[in-house]
Image: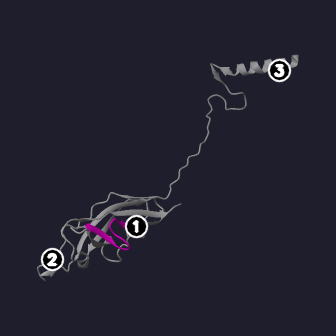
Amino acid sequence: MKSSMTKLAAATVAMVAVVVGGAEAAPLGLFPAAGEPVTTTFSVSASVASGCVIGNSTTMNFGGLQMLSSATGGLSPDSDFASAMFDATCTNGTALPALKFTSQNGGGSAFGMMGGVNSDVIGYSLYAGTVEGAAIAHDTSAAFAGFDADGTVKNLRVVGVITSSDKAGKTIGSYADTVTITASFTPD
Protein backbone atom coordinates (compact mmCIF):
# COMPACT_ATOMS: atom_id res chain seq x y z
CA MET A 1 0.00 0.00 0.00
CA LYS A 2 2.93 2.28 0.77
CA SER A 3 4.21 1.74 -2.76
CA SER A 4 0.82 2.78 -4.25
CA MET A 5 0.71 5.89 -2.10
CA THR A 6 4.23 6.79 -3.13
CA LYS A 7 3.31 6.46 -6.82
CA LEU A 8 0.16 8.57 -6.31
CA ALA A 9 2.13 11.27 -4.49
CA ALA A 10 4.76 11.30 -7.23
CA ALA A 11 2.06 11.66 -9.92
CA THR A 12 0.41 14.50 -8.01
CA VAL A 13 3.73 16.31 -7.64
CA ALA A 14 4.39 15.82 -11.36
CA MET A 15 0.96 17.30 -12.26
CA VAL A 16 1.49 20.26 -9.97
CA ALA A 17 4.94 20.77 -11.40
CA VAL A 18 3.58 21.24 -14.93
CA VAL A 19 1.31 24.08 -13.85
CA VAL A 20 3.28 27.22 -14.57
CA GLY A 21 2.03 30.74 -13.73
CA GLY A 22 -1.59 29.60 -13.42
CA ALA A 23 -1.62 28.00 -16.90
CA GLU A 24 -1.49 24.28 -17.39
CA ALA A 25 1.57 23.17 -19.32
CA ALA A 26 1.56 20.15 -21.55
CA PRO A 27 3.03 16.89 -20.31
CA LEU A 28 6.41 16.30 -21.83
CA GLY A 29 6.45 14.62 -25.24
CA LEU A 30 2.70 15.02 -26.04
CA PHE A 31 2.58 18.64 -27.29
CA PRO A 32 5.05 20.94 -29.02
CA ALA A 33 7.55 22.73 -26.92
CA ALA A 34 6.88 26.31 -25.89
CA GLY A 35 7.02 28.73 -28.83
CA GLU A 36 6.31 26.13 -31.50
CA PRO A 37 3.12 26.75 -33.59
CA VAL A 38 0.07 24.61 -32.96
CA THR A 39 -2.38 24.00 -35.81
CA THR A 40 -5.76 22.44 -36.33
CA THR A 41 -8.30 22.36 -39.17
CA PHE A 42 -12.04 22.75 -39.55
CA SER A 43 -14.41 22.04 -42.42
CA VAL A 44 -16.38 24.67 -44.32
CA SER A 45 -19.42 23.75 -46.35
CA ALA A 46 -22.49 25.24 -48.02
CA SER A 47 -25.11 24.18 -50.51
CA VAL A 48 -27.09 25.96 -53.22
CA ALA A 49 -30.59 24.64 -53.84
CA SER A 50 -32.72 24.97 -56.94
CA GLY A 51 -35.06 27.92 -56.72
CA CYS A 52 -36.81 30.65 -58.67
CA VAL A 53 -38.34 34.01 -57.76
CA ILE A 54 -40.50 36.39 -59.77
CA GLY A 55 -41.62 39.93 -59.02
CA ASN A 56 -41.19 43.62 -59.74
CA SER A 57 -44.02 43.52 -62.28
CA THR A 58 -45.49 46.49 -64.12
CA THR A 59 -49.10 47.10 -65.16
CA MET A 60 -50.38 46.12 -68.60
CA ASN A 61 -52.57 49.06 -69.58
CA PHE A 62 -54.42 48.94 -72.91
CA GLY A 63 -55.83 52.43 -72.28
CA GLY A 64 -58.85 53.47 -74.37
CA LEU A 65 -59.63 50.70 -76.85
CA GLN A 66 -60.12 51.47 -80.54
CA MET A 67 -63.78 50.48 -80.80
CA LEU A 68 -64.89 52.43 -83.88
CA SER A 69 -63.39 53.29 -87.24
CA SER A 70 -64.16 56.60 -88.94
CA ALA A 71 -62.67 55.16 -92.14
CA THR A 72 -65.27 52.40 -92.33
CA GLY A 73 -68.06 54.06 -90.36
CA GLY A 74 -68.26 50.89 -88.25
CA LEU A 75 -66.31 48.82 -85.77
CA SER A 76 -62.56 49.12 -85.76
CA PRO A 77 -60.80 46.19 -87.45
CA ASP A 78 -57.63 47.02 -85.50
CA SER A 79 -56.22 45.10 -82.59
CA ASP A 80 -55.07 46.82 -79.40
CA PHE A 81 -51.65 46.12 -77.89
CA ALA A 82 -50.09 46.63 -74.46
CA SER A 83 -47.15 45.19 -72.57
CA ALA A 84 -45.94 44.55 -69.04
CA MET A 85 -42.55 43.68 -67.59
CA PHE A 86 -41.50 41.46 -64.70
CA ASP A 87 -38.28 40.11 -63.24
CA ALA A 88 -37.50 36.42 -62.89
CA THR A 89 -34.40 34.74 -61.46
CA CYS A 90 -33.47 31.10 -60.90
CA THR A 91 -30.36 29.78 -59.20
CA ASN A 92 -27.74 28.70 -61.71
CA GLY A 93 -28.41 25.12 -62.80
CA THR A 94 -32.07 24.95 -61.75
CA ALA A 95 -33.68 22.34 -63.99
CA LEU A 96 -36.57 23.10 -66.32
CA PRO A 97 -37.76 26.54 -65.16
CA ALA A 98 -41.25 27.32 -66.44
CA LEU A 99 -43.88 30.02 -65.97
CA LYS A 100 -47.66 29.70 -65.69
CA PHE A 101 -49.98 32.67 -66.33
CA THR A 102 -53.48 32.52 -64.81
CA SER A 103 -56.23 35.09 -65.39
CA GLN A 104 -58.58 35.90 -62.50
CA ASN A 105 -61.45 36.39 -64.98
CA GLY A 106 -60.37 33.88 -67.58
CA GLY A 107 -61.36 30.32 -67.92
CA GLY A 108 -60.36 27.32 -69.91
CA SER A 109 -57.73 28.56 -72.32
CA ALA A 110 -58.70 32.27 -72.21
CA PHE A 111 -57.51 35.42 -70.47
CA GLY A 112 -60.27 37.95 -69.80
CA MET A 113 -60.89 41.43 -68.39
CA MET A 114 -64.26 41.91 -66.69
CA GLY A 115 -66.17 45.18 -66.57
CA GLY A 116 -68.55 47.44 -68.41
CA VAL A 117 -72.16 47.96 -67.38
CA ASN A 118 -73.08 44.29 -67.88
CA SER A 119 -69.97 42.67 -66.33
CA ASP A 120 -68.83 41.80 -69.84
CA VAL A 121 -65.57 39.98 -70.43
CA ILE A 122 -63.08 41.21 -73.01
CA GLY A 123 -60.81 38.36 -73.99
CA TYR A 124 -57.14 38.92 -74.73
CA SER A 125 -54.03 36.93 -75.59
CA LEU A 126 -50.57 37.09 -74.05
CA TYR A 127 -47.25 36.54 -75.81
CA ALA A 128 -43.71 36.10 -74.50
CA GLY A 129 -41.66 39.12 -75.57
CA THR A 130 -43.28 39.84 -78.95
CA VAL A 131 -46.49 38.87 -80.76
CA GLU A 132 -44.53 36.55 -83.01
CA GLY A 133 -44.96 32.89 -82.25
CA ALA A 134 -47.59 31.07 -80.26
CA ALA A 135 -49.66 32.77 -77.59
CA ILE A 136 -49.10 31.88 -73.94
CA ALA A 137 -51.52 29.14 -72.91
CA HIS A 138 -53.73 30.12 -69.98
CA ASP A 139 -53.04 28.26 -66.72
CA THR A 140 -50.35 26.05 -68.28
CA SER A 141 -46.70 25.87 -67.21
CA ALA A 142 -44.33 26.30 -70.13
CA ALA A 143 -40.87 27.56 -70.98
CA PHE A 144 -40.69 31.32 -71.49
CA ALA A 145 -38.43 32.95 -74.10
CA GLY A 146 -35.39 34.50 -72.44
CA PHE A 147 -35.97 32.81 -69.07
CA ASP A 148 -32.82 30.82 -68.35
CA ALA A 149 -31.65 29.40 -65.03
CA ASP A 150 -28.23 31.05 -64.94
CA GLY A 151 -28.43 32.91 -61.63
CA THR A 152 -28.97 36.35 -63.17
CA VAL A 153 -32.06 38.57 -63.08
CA LYS A 154 -34.06 38.44 -66.31
CA ASN A 155 -36.29 41.41 -67.13
CA LEU A 156 -39.03 39.73 -69.15
CA ARG A 157 -41.73 41.26 -71.32
CA VAL A 158 -45.29 40.07 -71.86
CA VAL A 159 -47.31 41.52 -74.74
CA GLY A 160 -51.12 41.58 -74.63
CA VAL A 161 -53.36 41.66 -77.70
CA ILE A 162 -57.08 42.38 -77.89
CA THR A 163 -58.45 41.55 -81.34
CA SER A 164 -61.38 43.34 -82.94
CA SER A 165 -63.58 40.29 -82.36
CA ASP A 166 -62.57 40.18 -78.65
CA LYS A 167 -63.88 43.71 -78.05
CA ALA A 168 -66.83 43.83 -80.49
CA GLY A 169 -70.15 44.68 -78.83
CA LYS A 170 -68.72 45.26 -75.33
CA THR A 171 -70.41 47.88 -73.17
CA ILE A 172 -68.82 51.12 -72.00
CA GLY A 173 -66.92 51.19 -68.73
CA SER A 174 -63.67 50.08 -67.19
CA TYR A 175 -62.39 46.54 -67.53
CA ALA A 176 -59.77 44.84 -65.38
CA ASP A 177 -58.09 41.53 -64.71
CA THR A 178 -55.35 40.22 -62.44
CA VAL A 179 -52.86 37.79 -63.92
CA THR A 180 -50.91 35.57 -61.53
CA ILE A 181 -47.51 34.35 -62.70
CA THR A 182 -46.26 31.15 -61.08
CA ALA A 183 -42.66 29.97 -61.49
CA SER A 184 -42.02 26.24 -61.32
CA PHE A 185 -38.93 24.08 -61.68
CA THR A 186 -37.67 20.57 -61.09
CA PRO A 187 -36.33 20.41 -57.51
CA ASP A 188 -32.87 19.03 -56.69
Q: Amino acid at mark 1?
A: Lys
Against 32, residue 112 (above or below) is below
Q: Where's residue 154, x and y in %?
A: 36, 62
| Image coords of residue 164 (percent x, y) | 23, 78
Q: Secondary structure at mark 2?
A: strand
Discs 1, 3 touching: Cβ within 8 Å: no
Q: Nearer the viewer, residue 20 or 184?
A: 184
Query: Which residue position is annotated with label 1?
Result: 100
Q: Earlier in the sequence, mark 3 or mark 2?
A: 3
Q: Amino acid at mark 2?
A: Leu
In the visual, does 75 lie left or right of 112? left
Residue closer to the observer: 133 or 103? 103
Return the x and y of residue 67 as percentages of the image width and height: 17, 75
Which residue, as the protein is rendered here, is positioned at the far top? 2
Q: Which numbered tag is attached to residue 7? A: 3
Disc 3 vs disc 2: which is toward the camera?
2
Quadrant where the N terminus is found in the figure: top right
Q: Name which quarter of the figure residue 182 lies in.
A: bottom left
C-alpha separation, residue under disc 1 versus residue under disc 3: 81 Å
Three-letter residue code for mark 3? Lys
Q: Give the residue at x 42% y 65%.
A: 148
- Secondary structure type for disc 1: strand
Name the residue furthest bottom: 72
Magenta residue span: 100-114
Please tell me whether mark 1 or mark 3 is closer to you in this view: 1
Gap between marks 1 and 2 measured at Cα: 34 Å
Q: Which residue is mark 2?
A: 68
Answer left or right for 96 relative to 77. Answer: right
